[in-house]
Amino acid sequence: MPTLDAACGPIRPPICIPRSAGVVAVVRGKRQAESELENFEDSQNSSDRHEGWRYFIEKTDLRAGTDPVKATEHRQAELEGREANVLRETEAPSFRSLERHKLGGH
């Protein structure tokens, strides 16, 4: 959970579709993020909510006030980097699995 002085921002992803409409704001602190989140939810039209669009708060290393488009690009690059690392880790056989294979184990 974000600390009281960490930069945070509401994110708007759909619940049913694995894509995001992006960062909508970058603000300073958990309380401000919660307030912004509430404002966005209160102004959200019912058809958006019915389609599964929701907001959530995510901690970031960006400065409060960062342009939401730039924040979305930064977030996407971070996500892609993490996914690439996971893929590399799962594709590379571990030393132990190689040793078990050589010894005839599974």
Image (cartoon, rainbow, N blue to C red):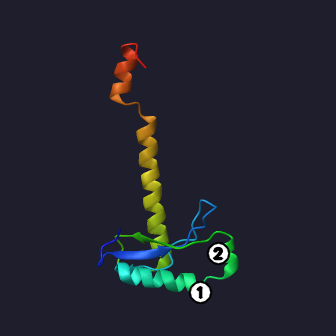
Q: In which quadrant is the C terminus drawn?
A: top left
Choose the circle earlier in sequence order: 2 or 1.
1
Which residue is painted at 43% across and 54% down in the image? 81
Q: Nearer the viewer, residue 16 or 8?
A: 16
Give 65 or 46, whichever is nearer the viewer.
46
Which quarter of the figure has residue 3?
bottom left
Residue 66 appears in the rendering: no
| Dot 2: element | helix
Residue under the point 44% across and 85% down? 35
Q: Is residue 43 above or below residue 54?
A: below
Residue 56 sits above or below residue 39 on the image: above
Identify the residue at horizontal 37%, vertical 15% (top origin): 102
Identify whether 18 is placed above or below 52.
above
Q: Nearer the viewer, residue 76 or 103?
A: 103
Extreme-right residue of the structure: 47
Q: State the residue at coordinates (42%, 79%).
A: 26
Badge 1 crowding class, 10 Å Cα cut-off, few under 14, some 14 to 19, many 20 or more, is few
Image quarter of residue 2? bottom left
- The location of residue 10, given as percent across then percent down, is 47, 76
SS at circle 1: helix
Q: Where is mark 2, residue-wise?
A: 49
Q: Residues within 10 Å of mark 2 (few under 14, many from 20)?
A: some
x, y percentage for residue 57?
A: 44, 72
Tell me the amino acid under the disc marked 1: Ser
Question: Where, quadrant-wise, is the N terminus in this rendering?
Answer: bottom left
Q: Is residue 65 left or right of residue 43?
A: left
Badge number at residue 43? 1
